[in-house]
């Protein structure tokens, strides 16, 4: 029987276009990158995800050539580029503040890099027009950047960074300054655009939902190290550690004892007996473990194949498509939150609610 839920830790990458190996970097004696490996396949979008200060931007800057690593190498298309200067790497960069020239026209902003690279004017015109069409800004070609909305400025910045056909596009929190609604829309646009162009991209964000929306693969970092690498689905379904689980926002943690492994794992928890689908392969009967119950893993009981638990309702919070039910569990008063359908009849605070948990919705950490 498969007993491990942590199978995609450091998942294998597609054939690598870019490889960074064992990157170390300290600032003023403080280590910021502690032996980081990274690989990006051709045409792939990889997101560096992690909490503020974990080293995402520093890693991006090492790849770009803006920061020299203390140790480790960066390879691109089979060539060691560790000591190749920024402007010779053929990479494009897009920052959170866009660094556009506000008093120049949209056309001139996009053309700027091409003029620096001494492209002939007819080719510049053709390329800028292609990009204006791509980002749907044709009619703003002669507008000044300061006349545009935040979302339009973001598209100009994207067009400008794509203009010289970079072999790798790097984006550092490119949607960071926009409001939530605009961010959601631009995430989808950006994803489809990168896919359409088959543009290889490295994307930095601290927002897990943004990473899920954009990435082919996520590299999740914590304090200068890689915690987990995997597709958005793999990371969401099988967080490799409690850190990843907490970073994804899973808060329903309970301490439990493993009382049986065969024929199926059984946990003794403050709620009662839980039956997770699997436990890490290293677990032994008698171990004290942490079980995380996903917020979407609960259904109203009774259920045919899972035991039912009685919890006390603390409050309900309406979030549009779903309702968050906050409930108190067991004698130790653990507080759990679940996404459940809105109630047909409004329950009252203190009501007893009977819930069952899907076996695959329970993640066990040793
Ligand atoms: P955020 O999401 O907040 O941008 P991050 O994960 O991108 O965070 P980094 O910007 O890489 O993190 O910074 C990691 C650590 O390195 C931070 O503590 C930061 O203060 C420090 N750091 C980064 N660049 C320098 C520098 N040039 N000099 C000194 N310290 C630096």
Image (spheres, grey):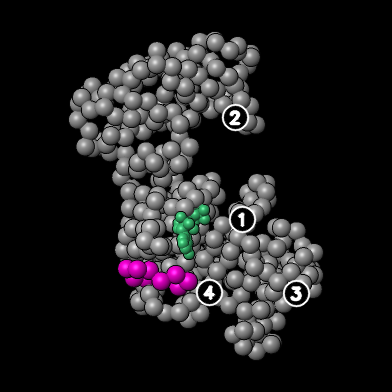
Residue 215 located left or right of residue 133: left
Distance in Å between CA atoms under marks 1 and 4? 20 Å
Mark 1: few/some/many CA within 10 Å (<14, 14-19, 20+): many
Q: Which residue is mark 4?
A: 166
Q: Quadrant of residue 111?
A: bottom right
At a point 31% along the width and 42% down the height, the residue shown is: 6
Q: Are marks 3 and 2 in contact (CB under 8 Å)?
A: no
Distance in Å between CA atoms under marks 3 and 2? 46 Å
Label 2 element class: strand
Mark 3: few/some/many CA within 10 Å (<14, 14-19, 20+): some
In depth, the one of 131 and 151 nearer the eye is 151
Q: Which residue is mark 2?
A: 322
Above-or-below relation of 150 to 125: above
At a point 41% along the width and 39% down the height, the residue shown is: 245
At a point 53% along the width and 48% down the height, the residue shown is: 207
Residue 104 badge? 3
Nearest to viewer (mark 3 / mark 2) = 3
Nearest to viewer (mark 1 / mark 4) = 1
Above-or-below relation of 325 to 5: above
Residue 330 on image: x %, y %: 40, 14
Residue 217 on image: x %, y %: 44, 55
Looking at the rendering, the stretch of residues picked out in magenta corresponds to 65-74
Q: Quadrant of residue 20?
A: bottom left
Can residue 285 be seen?
yes
Label 4 element class: loop
Q: Which residue is mark 1?
A: 175
Q: Quadrant of residue 107?
A: bottom right
Mark closer to the chain start, 3 or 1: 3
Quadrant of image for the N terminus:
top left
């Amino acid at each position: 029987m498969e007993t491990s839920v942590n199978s995609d830790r450091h998942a294998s990458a597609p054939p690598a276009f870019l490889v960074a190996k064992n990157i170390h970097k300290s600032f003023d004696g403080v280590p910021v990158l502690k032996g980081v490996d990274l690989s990006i396949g051709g045409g792939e979008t990889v997101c560096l995800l992690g909490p503020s200060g974990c080293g995402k931007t520093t890693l991006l800057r090492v790849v770009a050539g803006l920061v020299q690593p203390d140790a480790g190498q960066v390879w691109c298309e089979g060539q060691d580029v560790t000591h190749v200067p920024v402007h010779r790497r053929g990479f494009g960069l897009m920052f959170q503040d866009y660094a556009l020239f506000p008093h120049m026209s949209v056309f001139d902003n996009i053309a700027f890099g091409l003029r620096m690279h001494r492209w002939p004017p007819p080719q510049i015109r053709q390329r800028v027009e292609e990009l204006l069409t791509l980002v749907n800004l044709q009619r703003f070609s002669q507008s000044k950047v300061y006349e545009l909305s935040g979302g339009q400025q973001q598209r100009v910045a994207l067009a400008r960074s794509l203009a010289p056909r970079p072999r790798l596009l790097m984006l550092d929190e490119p949607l960071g300054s926009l409001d939530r609604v605009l961010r959601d829309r631009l995430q989808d646009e950006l994803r489809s655009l990168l896919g359409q162009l088959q543009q290889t991209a490295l994307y930095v964000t601290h927002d897990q939902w943004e990473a899920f929306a954009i990435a082919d693969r996520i590299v999740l970092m914590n304090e200068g190290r890689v915690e987990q690498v995997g597709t958005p689905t793999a990371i969401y379904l099988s967080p490799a550690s409690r850190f990843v689980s907490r970073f994804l926002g899973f808060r329903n943690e309970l301490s439990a004892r493993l009382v049986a492994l065969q024929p199926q794992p059984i946990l003794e928890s403050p709620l009662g007996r839980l039956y997770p689908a699997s436990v890490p392969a290293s677990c032994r009967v008698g171990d004290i473990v942490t079980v995380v119950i996903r917020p979407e893993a609960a259904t109203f009981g009774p259920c045919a194949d899972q035991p039912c638990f009685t919890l006390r309702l603390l409050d309900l919070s309406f979030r549009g498509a779903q309702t968050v039910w906050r409930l108190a569990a067991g004698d130790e008063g653990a507080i759990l939150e679940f996404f459940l359908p809105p109630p047909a009849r409004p329950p009252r605070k203190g009501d007893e609610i009977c819930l069952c948990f899907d076996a695959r919705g329970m993640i066990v950490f040793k």
